[in-house]
Amino acid sequence: MKKPVPSEELLEEWAREDEEARRIRRESADWEFIEKQEPKVREALIYLIERGDRYVAAKIACLTVDEFDEIRIRAKIPVVL
Amino acid sequence: MTIGVVDACFIIDWSRYKRRDRISNLFDIIYIHEEVMDQIRSIRAVEFTAQLMRLGVLRIYPWSRIEEEEFTRLRNEVLSNSRIPALERPDLLCLIIARTLEAVLISENIGVHRVVQYHPEYMHLRVWTALEVLENLVYRGAISVNSTDEFLDILKEYEEDTLHKFRSDRVNSVLRRMREWLGS
């Protein structure tokens, strides 16, 4: 059976939304705070800014989503929806 | 009866919100998977989760073997195409529970919102973020507003409490619906 796939139009719409969300996260983030973090947390925060996926970002930092969210708030990275 | 299913990010974010208790006005039952519960660790979110459980609003979903088979099938579909946004196991669990119960899925994960935009078996699902939860709390009378400007103040309050930013096109869609509701 053929697996469902999104249309090209939808993929383009998602790409536009992702770019806008990335821009907002980059502009809002406290980069000074981010640069001061230990490597795992710093990389996780940068991943979050670029991709917006909190679950994976928390995994990179070896934390739960909840624990990582405390750091997200301190890093001033908004959830863009 | 209104049934909801929640993901971890929503509970974590919503527990920061000063009007968080209002959610029990919107749903008779909210289900959560135990693996989603495992992500909740902060005192604030644990207290809120426990409070909803004491009220009988939040319950752990009794996951079954058949649903595990659906998880494997859906996971394989999603993983086989690199252009589909990544979805982790807890996200897929929430989608499957919401489909089984025909419940409103409350999720802050963009990948979940995108599955229902293209997958024929999941397209009928209602997936809300906090924006639609706030909108429906107004319709239910749990948050009182007399104008769209007052609703924008409510949104601003939520965005500040939780460090969120709702996209303007989504906010405008809600404002259009609310304007009609206020006028009726």
Image (cartoon, rainbow, N blue to C red):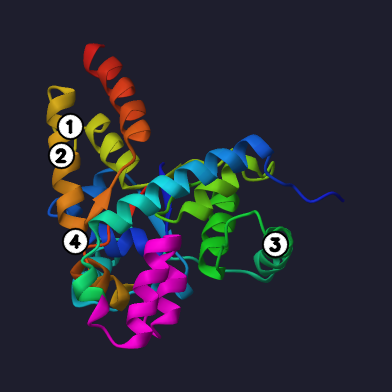
Q: Chain of mark 4?
A: B
Query: Disc 3 residue type?
Result: Glu
- Residues at badges 3 and 2 in contact (C-beta under 8 Å)? no
Q: Which residue is mark 3?
A: B70
To the question of a shared chain for discs 4 and 2, the answer is yes
Quadrant of the frame with the N terminus of chain B: top left
Decide which of A65, B68 is in the foreground and name it.
Answer: A65
Residue A60 visible? The answer is: yes
Query: Disc 1 residue type?
Result: Phe
Q: Which residue is mark 1?
A: B151
The stretch in magenta equals A35-64
Question: In the image, which disc is placed on residue A69?
Answer: none
With B123 as the anchor, is A27 left or right in this view?
left
In percent of the image, x 39 and y 76: which residue is there? A44
Q: How would you rate the neighbour count of disc 2 (Cα within 10 Å): few for under 14, some for 14-19, many for 20 or more?
A: some
- Residue B139 found in image quarter: top left
Please report whichever mark, 4 or 2, sits nearer to the chain's N-terminal start. Answer: 4
| Majority secondary structure of magenta residues | helix
Please report whichever mark, 4 or 1, sits nearer to the chain's N-terminal start. Answer: 4
In percent of the image, x 39 and y 66: which residue is there? A48
Q: Which residue is mark 2?
A: B154
- Mark 3 vs mark 1: in front: 1
Query: Disc 2 residue type?
Result: Ile
Q: What is the C-alpha distance between the residues marked 4 and 1?
A: 19 Å
Tag 3's secondary structure? helix
Q: Is residue B56 above or below residue A14?
A: below
With B111 as the anchor, is B82 left or right in this view?
right
- Residues at badges 1 and 2 in contact (C-beta under 8 Å)? yes
Please report whichever mark, 3 or 1, sits nearer to the chain's N-terminal start. Answer: 3
Question: In the image, which disc is placed on residue B16?
Answer: 4
Q: Is residue B117 above or below residue B144?
A: below
Q: What is the C-alpha distance between the residues marked 3 and 2?
A: 39 Å
